Every structure is written in structure tokens, then in C-alpha cells.
Image (tube, grey):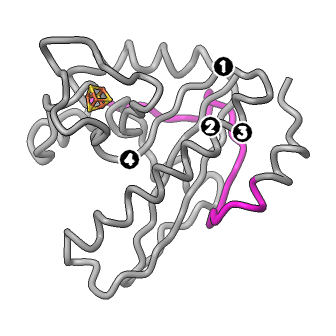
């Protein structure tokens, strides 16, 4: 059983913008997101963290719903120009590092975890997908959207803000049981 008070004491030491505990039954899943993955994301079919490597939406949903609880976290970083993709994407690695720290804090309380985070996995220079299994599953956090989860819905339900202007907001979900 997670000691939330203890966890929140430790979360307060991290540069998180917001965090919220949620129930996974609140998450809304949609097959339609896969259309966006297929037609708009250059990482579709490139890593184990993205479709189709993560499996069908129904499989992803079952994987998520095997966990009753989750912690949503966001970080924000100001950039000079949010349209500068290189500058904007450079803010992702620090968010992923914080996501790992939060996952470790939850796991050190004896919880099993599943982490969904941002974009595709960039851990290895050349992903093993699709010829070999993932080399580092402990560092492979599938993208939240890859699992068909509508992030804006859960964000609205819990008052999680996505900032405007030159501020990059990254969102992760740490599922635990
Ligand atoms: S950890 Fe490596 S092998 Fe696994 S998904 Fe990420 S890049 Fe691919």
C-alpha cells in the first residue's frame, strides 16, 4: 500500500509543475488516436514504445486497467521559441529523468509500476524494434497517447494545465499497484 504522505514529501523536492493522483477507471481511451500516430507521427513503427509495437489499443487498455491507481505528473520549461523543434524537444530528456525519479520513488515503496510518458523511446541510439526484444524495458516508457489515452480529458477532469506561449509542458502517467 502506497504511503502517499511520504511520497508527497519526496515529490515536493522535485521540480514538478503539477501532480495528481487518479483512478485508471477515469481514463478515456480512443482508437482514433492511432490514426494520428499513423498519419502524423514520424516515430510510428520505429520503437517498442510506439504503435504498433505497444500492441492494439484494447491490449494497451487492459494493461493500464490492470492498475487501479496512477499518478499524473507534469513539468514545464520556458523556451525562447516554442516553434523551434530542436529547442523544444531538448526539454524532453530532463522530464523523462524526473519521470524515472518519480517511478523509482513509487517502486521503492514496493509497488509494481507501469510508466507512460512522452513521445517515442530514445534510450538506445538504434532501437531493437522490430527484430529483437527491447534491450532496456526498465527505461522504455511508452508514449501516453500510444495507449489510446486522451490526455486532454484526464487533464481537464483534474485541473492539469498545459501552458501557452513559449512554455513546454510535458505529461507522464505512473501507474502503480
Ligand atoms: S530501450 Fe532501446 S530497444 Fe527498448 S524501446 Fe527504447 S530504444 Fe528501443
Check disc 4 and report its element: helix, strand or loop.
loop
Q: Badge 4 is on which residue?
A: 118
Q: Nearer the viewer, residue 29 or 133?
A: 133
Question: Callout 1: few (<14), some (14-19), or many (20+) C-alpha neighbours within 10 Å?
Answer: few
Q: Badge 2 is on which residue?
A: 103
Q: Badge 1 is on which residue?
A: 112
Which one is earlier in the sequence, the residue at label 3 or at label 4? 3
Q: Residue at x 91, y 45 (%)?
A: 5
Residue 126, position as x, y percentages in the image: 15, 33
Mark 3 or mark 4, whichever is nearer to me: 3
Q: CA distance from mark 4 to mark 2?
A: 14 Å
What segment carries the magenta color?
A: 11-31
Q: Is residue 26 magenta?
A: yes
Residue 82, position as x, y percentages in the image: 28, 78
Point out the residue furthest to the bottom here.
80
- Quadrant occupied by the C terminus: top right
Check disc 1 and report its element: helix, strand or loop.
loop
Which one is earlier in the sequence, the residue at label 1 or at label 3? 3
Quadrant of the picture in which ligand 1 is shown: top left
From what the image shows, is residue 171 above or below residue 75?
above
Q: Badge 3 is on which residue?
A: 105
Q: Quadrant of residue 131?
A: top left
Q: Which mark is residue 25?
A: none
Side of 97 relative to 168 (left or right)? right
From what the image shows, is residue 40 above or below residue 13?
above
User: Mark 3–mark 2 contact, CB under 8 Å?
Assistant: yes
Side of 171 relative to 25 (left or right)? left
Q: Quadrant of residue 92?
A: bottom left
Q: Residue at x 29, y 70 (%)?
A: 88
- In the rendered picture of this protein, how many numbered marks are placed on residues? 4
Q: CA distance from mark 4 to mark 1?
A: 20 Å
Amino acid at each position: 500500500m502506497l504511503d502517499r504522505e511520504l511520497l508527497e514529501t519526496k515529490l515536493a523536492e522535485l521540480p514538478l509543475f503539477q501532480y495528481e493522483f487518479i483512478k485508471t477507471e477515469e481514463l478515456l481511451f480512443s482508437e482514433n488516436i492511432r490514426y494520428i500516430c499513423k498519419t502524423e507521427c514520424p516515430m510510428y513503427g520505429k520503437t517498442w514504445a510506439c504503435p504498433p509495437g505497444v500492441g492494439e489499443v484494447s491490449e494497451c487498455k487492459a494493461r493500464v486497467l490492470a492498475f487501479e491507481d496512477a499518478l499524473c505528473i507534469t513539468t514545464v520549461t520556458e523556451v525562447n521559441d516554442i516553434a523551434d523543434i530542436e529547442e523544444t524537444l531538448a526539454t524532453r530528456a530532463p522530464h523523462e529523468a524526473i519521470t524515472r525519479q518519480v517511478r523509482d520513488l513509487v517502486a521503492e515503496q514496493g509497488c509494481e509500476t507501469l510508466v507512460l510518458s512522452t513521445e517515442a523511446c530514445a534510450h538506445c541510439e538504434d532501437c531493437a524494434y522490430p527484430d529483437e526484444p527491447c534491450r532496456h524495458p526498465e527505461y522504455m516508457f511508452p508514449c501516453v497517447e500510444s495507449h489510446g489515452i486522451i490526455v486532454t480529458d484526464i487533464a481537464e477532469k483534474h485541473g492539469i494545465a498545459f501552458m501557452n506561449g513559449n512554455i513546454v509542458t510535458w505529461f507522464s502517467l505512473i501507474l502503480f499497484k
